[in-house]
Amino acid sequence: MNSTSGVGGTEGGTGVPIAGSAAPRVRLPPPVSRGRQLRSGAVGLYRVLRANPLSFVGFVLVAFTLILAAFVVFAPHLVAHYGAEQQTGVYNSAPTLFRWPPSFAHPFGTDGASYDIFSEVMLALPTDLGIGVAIAGVALIAGGGLGLVAGFWDRPGHLSGYTSSFIMRVTDVFLAFPSLILALALVASIGKGTIQAMIAIMLTWWPYYVRLVRGEVIAVKHLPYVTAARAAGVRETKILTRHVLRNVLEPVVVYFTLDIGTVLVIFSTISFVGVGVPYPSSAPEWGSMMSFYQGNYPFQIYWWAITFPALAIFVTVLAFSLLGDGLRDVLDPRSRRALAESAAHEPPPEANVGEPPVLTLPLGRDSPSGSAALGGAP
Amino acid sequence: MGRSTSDLLIFLGKRLLQLLPVLFGTILLTFIVTHVAAVSPCARWYPHAKPSVIAHCQAQFALPIYTQFWNYFSQLLQGNWGADQYGTAVFPVIASSLPATLELVFTALFLMIVIGIPLGVIAAQFAGRWADHLVRIFYLSGWATPTYVGAIIAADFLARGVGLPSSGEFSAPPPFVRVTHMSVVDAIIAGNLPFTFDALSHLILPAAVLAFINMGIATRMTRTSMLEVLPLDFVKSARMKGLSNFVVLYKHALRNALITTTTVLGVEAGALLAGTVVIEEVFAWPGIGAYAFAAIGGAGRPNFDGAIAVVVVFAIGVVVANLIADVLYGVLDPRVDWR
């Protein structure tokens, strides 16, 4: 029915087949074994992380970032000395607007008002993370809810079918805009500012979750256990919340992890354009810092002013991406099946030579090949 | 299963018809964003304008909403896209800056194809080993770099290091007529070799940044599809025939794996177009992205009609790119029924 949903049959690179409008045209084999259940809890996570060293690096970095952010929130004086000492005039006592290069006292240097850039970068960490989680969270709840409804109740010819296709058509229209452009236009018309920029991104971010969740619901809702529940007389709403939602949750949460980084990038870009967080602000933000420093501090002389906020964004987003990308590899039925098969058919000659025993992942309880996934590959 | 030429025409016609509601929807959504959701729009959009302009704007916004929409919609269709608050018409500027953006986007797309896809093949070939990890670090680094960070680093730092220019399309005003408004193409048409190289040297950095930031999905999809294709029987039989590894990988396997990657590249058009907003601003590239940056208020000079125009143009760009990807997918994948 539309031009965008038929494209590729995948959405956002997650490799999740989109059923629905693409289904009548593309004859895909029925989803036989999805096998995407992970061993829940710490054991499952540990095994996923061991399978891919980069995911492990990402996990460590994410944990480090979160701990650091908690320190900034609960014990700011340990991490940053911007707030307290600025009031006592220690940094403002400098008579000239001198910009100090990195030193032992100021690891990231100081800026024109002699503010410690290390402190500013640290203070921005919880702000940026909070904004990323808030925007992605709202998008997850709003878009995910719409996706559940659109995927679960879509009987053609009935009210539910019309509602479902209406939701999907509106989603298509939103997806036709690059979200950055639409968010910029929204901020420009509702006014610049932190809250406005957040609202603007939330309003443009939910359609991705509609697509993702709807695709997952459609894939799950015809599985035998759902039919069995229905035959047993379980109410539809209960089937949705107890049987469908639970199985949809996992890929969505993984996508959410990856998404926090992406949202952070978009938000800081809007700040960089100058319509997001203002500079200076009581709650510093990396994008607005970069925007200010880029405009006022020539890079060739004051290299530290831009370098450290840039590194902060890069490392934070890379952490979430490393973790999310590795998880996605494991959750994506296509790449997992392929890895398992290639491992089964062509064992690498160096395997088992001086290496720990082949790791088995309890990924696909319902698919025998799933256990070999990634396990034989490294 | 209809895959004849007449079926292809039906297929194309259907795709084009399905485009119309989405296009109308994007125009409607742009209207809602700029006219309905706007808070005190006139003061915000015309901060430096003459009182007469502001009075005209306020009179426009006082009209009933359907009259406003009709005015907006009919003007848009007639190509009468208004003017900024200093009186410069929007449409000619957009028409002359769009080619520069397309040049940038297509160059980036080219780089994504010639670098990103082979990287995906290498990652699949050595799945789980160090080459795979290196490729993953490379594309995730692009993924994790905000466009402005990449652009600033390239323009301020890399440009010096490798001796490439980092601003504008040419080092000197070109002595020839700008036929297409694409710098390299115009220089080639004029037969001016020094200017061709000059234009290329200006183009390469912004395009490389744009490609690096968006390469991840192409590489990732190629890797996933290759992993899916490599264990299949036809690849094995190609190997058993004694074909070289290169031919097996790039001629037999990649050809099948590319179907998915092609469509993903089409979907990437939106990200590429959005990336031009910051990249063109940093590299002073005279395209529609830099125009959008200014129109939306990046430099404190918002431009109401210009903002509407760029949002609509970007949306049309994405819709058309998706159409192309959709059609390509239908042509490349033999399982797609054209009827």
Image: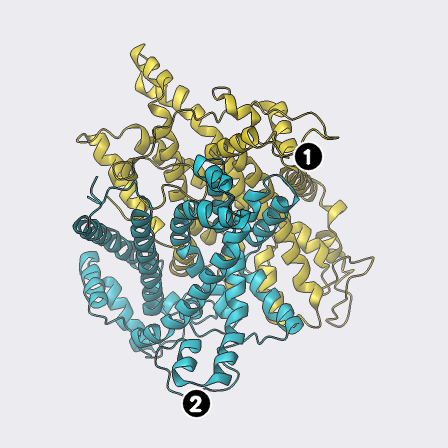
Along the line of sight, which residue is nearer the eye, A285 or A76? A285
What amino acid is found at the position of numbered circle 2 in the picture?
Pro
Q: Quadrant of the N terminus of chain B?
A: top left
The picture places residue A135, in percent across and down from the top left corner, at 48, 44
Q: Identity of the amino acid at label 1?
A: Glu
Q: Chain A is which colour? A: yellow
Circle 1 residues within 10 Å: few <14, some 14–19, many ≥20? few
Q: Secondary structure at mark 1?
A: loop
Residue at image point 61% right, 29% down: A375
Where does residue A24 sit, x and y in percent of width and height? 25, 36
- Colour mapping: by chain
In the rendered structure, the answer to whether residue A107 lies left or right of residue A251 reads right
Q: Nearer the viewer, residue B297 or A260?
A: A260
Q: Chain of mark 1?
A: A
- Residue B63 makes an appearance in the image: no
- Is disc 2 placed on a helix, strand or loop? loop
* Residue beneath the point at 33% across and 44% down: B333
Q: Which residue is mark 1?
A: A350
Q: What shade does chain B have?
A: cyan
Residue A82 position (above or below residue B92) = above
From the image, tell me which residue sits under label 2: B175
Query: Whole-Å distance between the Cαs marked 2 and 1?
Result: 62 Å
Residue A18 figure quarter: top left
For image coordinates 37% across by 16% down, the residue present is: A225
Subunit bearing disc 2: B
